[in-house]
Image (cartoon, helix red, strand yellow):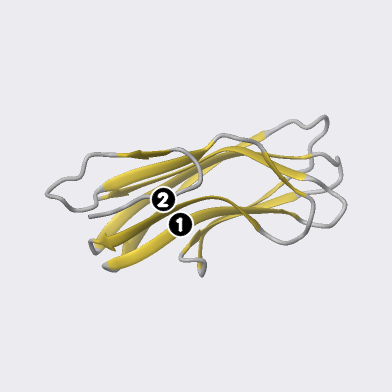
Amino acid sequence: MGELSSNDEVYKKDDIDKNFQSGDVLSESEDTNSTSGFVQKCTITFNALMSGYYIIQWYYEVSNEHNTKRTEVRIQLDDTADLGRDLSDPTNNNNYHQKSGFAKNELSAGNHKIDIDYRSLSNGGVSKIRNARIYINKI
């Protein structure tokens, strides 16, 4: 059976036949990062995943306090494979860009993790992210 974990609030969907079918995690709080190293915003982990095809969806809002700096966001599977990557344009007055995406992936049986990471593309900017969500569903 799949188990979801996060430091943020977790919602778990009904399991069908006692096997992991779908789940989601969200992190609504605003977080900041002023370095060029990636910082994790939210994570969904699961154990004993059934092998098969899954739709993985994500949403987040991103900004940078400096109007010439950019924020980079990546969505990763098992901290190795990028499912999505985005480089947001600089913003003025801390305006937020709404971003979303999805991927169809064949996942092997076992343990997996999907996370959203973000960073300021260059030092001197303060990247901000909020309302991050990850949803996964077996198809």
| Residue 135 position in % (x across, y down) | 40, 44
Q: Is residue 82 left or right of residue 45?
A: right
**Residue indicated by mark 1:** 114
Name the front one of labels 2 and 1.
2
**Residue indicated by mark 2:** 5
| Residue 60 position in % (x across, y down) | 57, 40
What amino acid is at disc 1? Answer: Ile
Q: Is residue 77 left or right of residue 124?
A: left
Q: Which quarter of the figure is the N terminus placed in?
A: bottom left
Q: Is residue 115 left or right of residue 19?
A: right
| Residue 52 position in % (x across, y down) | 24, 61
Q: Is residue 128 left or right of residue 138?
A: right
Q: Is residue 81 above or below residue 73?
A: below
- Residue at horizontal 79%, vertical 42%? 90
- Residue at horizontal 79%, vertical 51%? 34
| Residue 110 position in % (x across, y down) | 29, 68
Q: Which element type, helix, strand or loop, lies under badge 2?
A: loop
Q: Nearer the viewer, residue 74 or 109?
A: 109
Q: Quadrant of residue 108?
A: bottom left
- Which mark is first along the chain, 1 or 2? 2
Report the Cα–Cα distance between label 2 and label 1. 11 Å
